[in-house]
Image (cartoon, grey):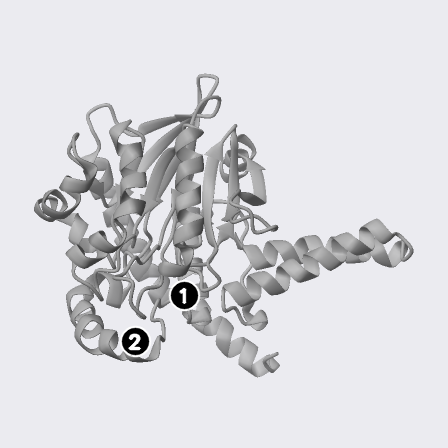
Amino acid sequence: MPSKQQGFKLKEVVQDTAYHEQVCNALDEALKRIAQAEPAAGARTLDLSTGRYVILSDHHRGARNAADDFRRCERAYNAAMAYYFRMGYTLVILGDAEELWEERPAPVLQSYDHSLQLEARFHKEHRYIRIWGNHDDAWAYPDLVKEYLGPIFGPPDLQVHEGVRLKVCDDGQELGSILLVHGHQGTSTSDRWAGFSRLVVRYIWRPFQRLTGVSLNTPAKDWVLREKHNVALYSWALRQPGLILIAGHTHRPVFRSKPHAVRVMEQLDELESQLAAQPNDLQLLRRVSELNARLEWVRTQEQQKPSVEGMIAFEKPCYFNTGCCSFLDGDITGLELAEGEIRLVRWPDEHEQPLPDILERASLRGVFAEVNS
């Protein structure tokens, strides 16, 4: 654990006001562009009684070499594709699906043709939304989308967006909107200096990574940068009336504006208090033990230093994060919007079966009530 002085310094870094404003200003501009790009009818509609969406991000599909972060997650991902297609979900790919800073498009798409064909089935049934991120920003150019993704996805022509808004309705009542965006906007290496960063990764980092197997995935490994960016995303979402932001980019699942590890810690604290009053309750002891195990699993999976958890208090559940499809243990996480709920899920489940494991769940109507309060 850090000293008190170190803790203050970490908090100063995480609460970098200039950085937050930079990200917030970039998201303001992105939202304007997204609104302008919407059809005349406006934002898409998510009806809580019938809508089913699954949102996944940050696959970082490579060319099946040592620099490829998706290889170990391919099995879980393909199983998820089969499940969600048959269940009638709309699939949202929230950016950084392909690792195009390290690789050219052709070898990546050839390496994962089957996974992409599983995605293409959603597109053919008009149940597919693609959003580009900083590592696959080649898809911001329609000519490149047509050249490389067109042959895979086929008609209708695939559109890849900077972001998408969902207007959320329940029984005819509009509750608010959900903004789906990768979340890299405003960061220097990912936004303003993306071209230079891409060259560094492709011609300097990639040869080194192939030799060593060391993964880049920043901010996935820099826990202070990751927390700082999560705070910036939350700060922006907090300013938007009636809006929930769903992003990726940081590779860290966030539910109701809190990292998953913090949510587990809160549940654990509550149960520890109950166990202290009922020390002979074996069922309660088992639940406490299971949550302790889950906390350490989350910390290890996210390469998270415990000292940073809960450093910043978030007031409203206006920000959610998918996590990623490139965890080192082969698991993937994502968000489901279905049956009137928002759910954080992990594949495979806790028994290593090809099924979704629901880690967190909340009523979307309840979340919007808190956001609008």
> Label 2: few (<14), some or many (≥20) within 10 Å?
some
The answer to whether residue 310 is left or right of residue 134 is right
Residue positioned 75% across, 52% down in the render: 287
Q: In this rendered view, identify the residue nearer to me: 12 or 119.
A: 119
Judging from the image, what secondary structure is the residue with disc 1 in? loop
Q: Is residue 217 above or below residue 337?
A: below
The answer to whether residue 23 is left or right of residue 37 is right
Q: In this rendered view, identify the residue nearer to me: 243 or 80.
A: 80
Residue 6 appears anywhere in the view: yes
Residue 259 spot, x, y in % from top left: 53, 56
Q: What amino acid type should be assigned to the residue bearing mark 1? A: Ala
Residue positioned 88% across, 52% down in the render: 281
For disc 2, the marked residue is 209
Judging from the image, what secondary structure is the residue with disc 2 in? helix
> Closer to the N terminus: mark 2 or mark 1?
2
Residue positioned 20% across, 28% down in the render: 39
For disc 1, the marked residue is 220
Query: Looking at the rendering, which quadrant does residue 32 occupy?
Result: top left
Query: Quarter holding the N terminus?
Result: bottom right
Residue 244 spot, x, y in % from top left: 43, 41
Query: Looking at the rendering, which quadrant does residue 73 occupy?
Result: bottom left
Residue positioned 33% across, 71% down in the render: 216
Q: Is residue 110 above or below residue 128?
A: below
Residue 248 spot, x, y in % from top left: 38, 53
Q: In this rendered view, identify the residue nearer to me: 332 or 229.
A: 332
